[in-house]
Image (spheres, grey):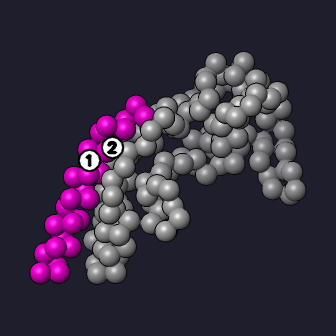
Amino acid sequence: MTTPQVTGVKEALKTLRQIDPEMRAQFNNDAKQIVQPAIDAARNGYNGLNLPSGTARRWAPGGRVLFPMTTNKMQRRVRLKIDTRVRARSVFKIVNSDAGATIFEWAGVRSTNSLARAFDAKTGKPTPRVVWPATESHLDDIRRNLEDSIREVEKHLNRMLD
């Protein structure tokens, strides 16, 4: 699994926010539209999942509620995150902000355990299970369209700075 690398995006977006916040907001909206097919594919990936029965019960280790897990909640929480922090490894991320969905997505990546085996047996999906494969299937279009949008931002910044 590889991630596309485009340099200068964080800096351009930070500069855009400082110079023209409305244009930055418009870029964010455009980015959401660009990744929407991947988000829709990820949301559809949760349709008809047969989850293990234990995931329907409440599980809150340390007080943090992770389960019950429902496909409706898992679908609703898939979204785009734009992260321009210095330590961010990626500017554009398609994430599922539901804790249970994150467990479902990644259980069994590093080592097999009973929960990962239960997910594998019930769903028949390999790890990662939904969001990553949905995003990868649309990655070329997303990359191309985001690069076009970023070029437009750069042109706008250059016009403003000249």
Along the viewing direction, whichever of 51 and 131 lies nearer the viewer? 131
Residue 13: x and y in percent read: 34, 68
What predominant SS class does the magenta segment belong to?
helix
At x 64%, y 26%, the residue is 49
Disc 1 marks a residue whose amino acid type is: Asn
Q: Which mark is residue 145?
A: 1
Q: Which mark is residue 58?
A: none
Segment tinted magenta in the rendering:
135-162
- Magenta span has 7? no
At x 23%, y 65%, the residue is 153
52 vs 68: above or below = above
21 vs 50: above or below = below
Q: Which mark is residue 142?
A: 2
Which quadrant holds residue 55? Answer: top right
Disc 2 marks a residue whose amino acid type is: Ile
Number of other residues with Cα within 10 Å of mark 1, as a class: few under 14, some 14 to 19, many 20 or more: some
Along the viewing direction, whichever of 72 and 17 lies nearer the viewer? 17
